[in-house]
């Protein structure tokens, strides 16, 4: 993996990776919603004479393409209100660019939320991660590579971190060579709705390690932001195994009826699910018709049935919780009548904690059974149980490591495969 030096810092995740940054944008306004696959409009294009870097091939020109170039493919909840500068915040959102040449630079602007936060991105070339982009204030250009062998290559830029760290504006790419039509879009589509597990919280560092309190860019430290990675969470791993496009709709601490904490944003998932930017109370609505899933995995309940960070009663009325769950599934099927919904249990919940009589895992499992039975009794065969094993997370905050997330996806795969006929 290529190493990028930066005036701010250099991070290592087992192997060195590059640090690249975005300029700040203090605006919190959002304009109109857009589709999930495509930029819309025609891009401006500029050319300057360059070379093929240290790669092999003919002498090439550097050509710049705007964020609205129709050959750039987006997957996720993306705001195309300003066509040349699409904006997105949800983890796991991807930008795919196919080109013929020897190098590529991406152009980004990070929100730099509160002046203290930033997002992180995986940059993969031809399926291999070559850099992790770590935004820096007032930096907009990030050279991912310029020493490829001349030929056709595909860049996938994927947001690692959560929406709470802010949005990023994608302004296009500069290619040493030329932009090509994107790869064919997958025929299968999946949505993963969940919390910190689904968002890949703490996936690339060990629990209680110094990395879990790190964002080396800021002297005050952080929450291990460089080691969050939605792209290695069970959802994207599972979707890629099926060659499916996917949306990750996940927020740390969120629940179906109540969140882990009420000190911050207390809105549970049903209250934010319809938004383009889940973290923004004034967000425009997301147009659900822009992405039609075949399968929807609902991975909620861990935070509902946990003790939380306050003095709340850990117990929940199972009748009321089941009714709320059914209402949310009804909403999902209303948007996507042909989709299959998988009601998933929790990898983190266990009985007998923090009090010996607590039955949090059993209670969530009971709810899942009730939900599926409700639809079976109604003659609807599109809602399925997805029971998973309890795991003691080895990542930050006892979340799952990338390896554990992959094991989770492997456990889930035959259940989804059988239900979907894949």
Image: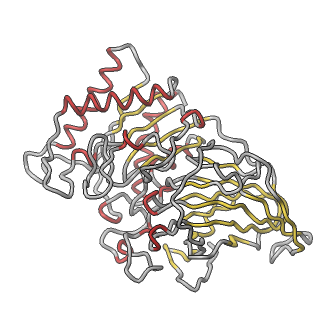
| Residue in view at x 35 percent, y 14 percent | 378
Instruction: Farthest residue to the right: give it.
Output: 58
Q: How many marks?
A: 0
Whether residue 250 is visible here, answered yes or no, is: yes
| Residue in view at x 59 percent, y 83 percent | 6
Q: Quadrant of the C terminus?
A: top right
Instruction: Farthest residue to the bottom: give it.
Output: 7
Q: Quadrant of the N terminus?
A: bottom right
In the image, 321: left or right of 216?
Answer: left
| Residue in view at x 64 percent, y 49 percent | 80
In the image, 141: left or right of 362?
Answer: right
Residue 335: image location, x then y, percent: 49, 29
Picture quadrant of residue 53: bottom right
In the image, 264: left or right of 230?
Answer: left
Residue 174: image location, x then y, percent: 77, 66
Q: Looking at the picture, does residue 232 appear above or below residue 321?
A: below
Whether residue 406 is visible here, answered yes or no, is: no
């Amino acid at each position: 993996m290529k190493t990028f030096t930066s005036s701010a810092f250099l991070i290592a995740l087992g192997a060195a990776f590059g640090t690249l940054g975005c300029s700040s944008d203090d605006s919190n306004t959002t304009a109109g919603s857009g589709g999930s696959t495509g930029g819309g409009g025609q891009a401006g294009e500029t050319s300057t004479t360059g070379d093929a870097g240290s790669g092999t091939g003919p002498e090439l020109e550097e050509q710049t393409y705007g964020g609205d170039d129709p050959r750039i493919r987006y997957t996720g909840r993306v705001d195309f209100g300003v066509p040349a500068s699409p904006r997105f915040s949800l983890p796991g959102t991807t930008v795919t660019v196919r080109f013929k040449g020897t190098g590529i630079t991406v152009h980004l602007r990070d929100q730099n939320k509160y002046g203290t936060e930033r997002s992180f991105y995986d940059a993969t070339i031809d399926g291999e991660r070559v850099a992790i982009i770590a935004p820096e204030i007032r930096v907009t250009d990030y050279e991912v590579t310029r020493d490829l062998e001349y030929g056709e290559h595909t860049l996938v830029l994927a947001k690692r971190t959560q929406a709470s760290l802010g949005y990023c504006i994608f302004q296009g790419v500069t290619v040493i060579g030329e932009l090509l039509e994107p790869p064919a879009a997958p025929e299968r589509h999946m949505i993963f709705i969940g919390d910190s597990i689904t968002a890949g919280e703490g996936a690339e560092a060990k629990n209680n390690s110094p990395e879990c309190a790190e964002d080396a860019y800021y002297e005050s430290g952080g929450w291990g932001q460089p080691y969050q990675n939605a792209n290695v969470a069970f959802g994207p791993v599972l979707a890629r195994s099926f060659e499916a496009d996917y949306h990750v709709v996940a927020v740390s601490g969120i629940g179906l009826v109540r969140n882990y904490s009420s000190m911050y944003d207390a809105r549970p998932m049903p209250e934010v699910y319809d938004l383009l930017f889940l973290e923004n109370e004034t967000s425009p609505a997301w147009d659900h018709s822009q992405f039609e899933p075949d399968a929807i995995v609902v991975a909620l309940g861990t935070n509902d049935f946990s003790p939380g960070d306050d003095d709340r009663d850990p117990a929940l009325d199972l009748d009321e919780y089941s009714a709320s769950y059914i209402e949310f599934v009804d909403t999902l099927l209303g948007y996507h009548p042909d989709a299959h919904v998988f009601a998933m249990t929790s990898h983190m919940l266990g009985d007998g904690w923090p009090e010996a009589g607590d039955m949090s895992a059993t209670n969530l499992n009971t709810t899942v059974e009730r939900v599926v039975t409700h639809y079976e009794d109604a003659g609807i065969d599109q809602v399925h149980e997805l029971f998973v094993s309890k795991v003691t997370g080895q990542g930050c905050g006892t979340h799952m490591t990338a390896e554990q997330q992959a094991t989770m996806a492997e456990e889930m795969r035959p259940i989804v495969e059988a239900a979907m006929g894949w």
